[in-house]
Image (tube, rainbow, N blue to C red):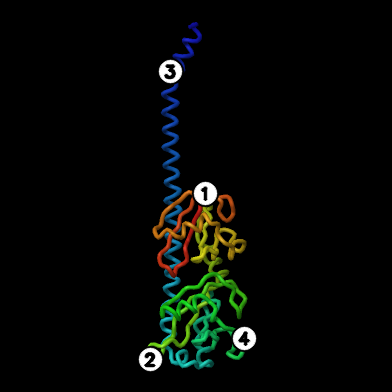
Amino acid sequence: MSLSARLAVLVLAAILPLVAALAVAQRGLYRDQEADVRAEVLHQVRLLAGELSQLVDGIRQIQAVLVEMPAIRDGDAAGCTEILARVIDGNGLLNNLLVADRRGRLVCDGVHQPADLAPYTVADRDYFRDARRTGAFAAGTYSIGRSTGAAVVHFASPIVDDVGRFQGVVITALDLQALGARLGREPWSVDHATLVTDRVGTILLRHPDNEAYVGRRMTPTLLALLDDPEPGTADVSGTVDGCLASSATSRRRPTTPASTSASA
């Protein structure tokens, strides 16, 4: 072996351990950075899920009071309208409050006069059927309000008589545009896109660019994350906008929308 070849071997023998050490260190740094990103994503999702859970609990409590009011229990359309209008006044997140009878026909709401509601029914809505079937608070999915034309998600509580027979529902229509504007003021990380979906995977909120995404369906890959009952992270591809690779989901209750945050 020539002298130059021997020198080359000696140089390689000297630097290979250093290269290997640098590679290991770089890999460790990448793992630490990846862990930090996952932790930040999951923390953000948990905060958002907690805020939405509190919002849904507030709606549940309002409805628990309303279903006991005599004007609502007795189907007094004029009195019911006045009560619902007062509740809506000053609450920018509520698109409407409504009462439907046992057949799903609207009796009153907080926006229209009772006579204007005659053409409308909620008998085919999932939240009405679920509240009637279970006798408990129920959440709907993304929909367009029939009397307002706004993008909303509905929540319903059953009205029952003194012997427990189903008499109708009190319905809250949560305004998704107003909710998106409110959450858009939060100090979200610029490196994350955050989605909130209903239980069938239709996007209720998205930050950033909320208006461009509300009402769109998540991809099957992201939909599969909604079946996981525990918060966590997963590497995915082919998201709704085709550019993100890391996501986390958090679900507090079956009636609370699922939240997904993805890192760029």
The alpha-carbon separation of the residues under discs 1 and 2 comes to 54 Å
Q: Which residue, given by chain and number where applicable, does mark 3 sit on? A: 13
Q: Earlier in the sequence, mark 4 or mark 1?
A: 4
Task: Tell me which amino acid carries mark 2.
Answer: Asp
Q: Which residue, given by chain and number where applicable, does mark 4 sit on? A: 119
Q: Position of residue 86 (x, y in %)?
A: 51, 85
Q: Are marks 3 and 2 in contact (CB under 8 Å)?
A: no
Q: Earlier in the sequence, mark 3 or mark 1?
A: 3
Q: Is residue 145 left or right of residue 248?
A: right
The alpha-carbon separation of the residues under discs 2 and 4 comes to 29 Å
Q: Earlier in the sequence, mark 1 or mark 2?
A: 2
Q: Position of residue 53 (x, y in %)?
A: 43, 68
Q: Nearer the viewer, mark 1 or mark 2?
A: 2
Which residue corresponds to the image point at 44% horizontal and 21% vertical from the top-left?
A: 15
- For mark 4, give the secondary structure: loop
Which residue corresponds to the image point at 57% horizontal and 58% vertical from the top-left?
A: 208
Q: Nearer the viewer, mark 4 or mark 1?
A: 4
The alpha-carbon separation of the residues under discs 4 and 1 comes to 46 Å
Task: Tell me which amino acid carries mark 4.
Answer: Pro
Which residue corresponds to the image point at 46% horizontal and 18% vertical from the top-left?
A: 12
Q: Are marks 4 and 1 in contact (CB under 8 Å)?
A: no
At label 3, counting other C-alpha atoms closer than 10 Å, the crowd grade (few under 14, some 14-19, many 20 or more) is: few
176 vs 138, nearest the viewer: 138
- For mark 1, give the secondary structure: loop
219 vs 206, nearest the viewer: 219
Q: Are marks 3 and 1 in contact (CB under 8 Å)?
A: no
Task: Tell me which amino acid carries mark 3.
Answer: Ala
**Residue 162's disc number:** 2
Q: Earlier in the sequence, mark 2 or mark 4?
A: 4
- For mark 3, give the secondary structure: helix
Q: Which residue, given by chain and number where applicable, does mark 1 sit on? A: 245
The alpha-carbon separation of the residues under discs 3 and 1 comes to 39 Å
